[in-house]
């Protein structure tokens, strides 16, 4: 096949590094599925959620940005949003003790 020209090699390297770490770890077939899943817009269905919803988000989440949480909070009839400042995509791990306190409080209120 031969060597790639420098610009094609650079492009190939960039494409290999594109996407999240989760995406890059997938097989080719799973990448196709992943793309379909993350691009599916379920926003119109949010109004149909008839259970209380606790949304926990990190202010620094770059994979599912905060504006998405705010949209969900607005469209889900009984939703509450807790934002952990400085936390990322895995905010519940970044702020584990705070998350557990919030979750415990949510479950206690829901049980009443």
Image: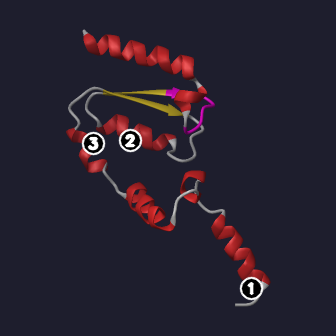
Query: Does residue 62 sit above or below 10 in this rendering?
Result: above
Separation of marks 2 and 1 at Cα, in angstroms: 45 Å
From the image, tell me which residue sits under label 1: 4
Discs 2/1, front: 1
Separation of marks 2 and 3 at Cα, in angstroms: 9 Å
- Which residue is at 53% across, 59% downward? 26
Dot 2 or dot 3: first in sequence order is: 3
- Which residue is at 40% across, 59% downward? 39
Query: Does residue 48 sit above or below 103 in this rendering?
Result: below
**Disc 1 element:** loop
**Disc 2 element:** helix
Q: Is residue 73 or residue 5 the one in the foreground?
A: 5
**Which quadrant does the C terminus fall into?**
top left
Q: Is residue 86 or residue 29 the one in the foreground?
A: 29
Query: Does residue 106 sit above or below 15 in this rendering?
Result: above
- Which residue is at 60% across, 32% downward? 87
- Secondary structure mainly formed by the magenta segment: loop
Residue 82 is inside the magenta segment: no
Discs 3/1, front: 1
What percent of the width, then of the height, locates residue 98? 54, 18
From the image, tell me which residue sits under label 2: 71
């Amino acid at each position: 096949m031969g060597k790639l020209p420098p610009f094609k090699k650079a492009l190939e390297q960039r494409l290999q590094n594109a996407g999240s770490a989760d995406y890059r770890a997938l097989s080719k077939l799973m990448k196709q599925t992943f793309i379909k899943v993350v691009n599916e817009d379920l926003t119109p269905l949010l109004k149909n959620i008839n259970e209380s919803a606790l949304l926990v988000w990190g202010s620094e989440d770059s994979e599912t940005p905060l504006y998405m949480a705010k949209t969900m909070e607005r469209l889900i009839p009984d939703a509450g949003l807790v934002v952990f400042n400085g936390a990322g995509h895995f905010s519940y791990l970044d702020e584990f003790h705070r998350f557990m306190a919030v979750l415990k409080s949510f479950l206690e209120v829901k049980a009443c």
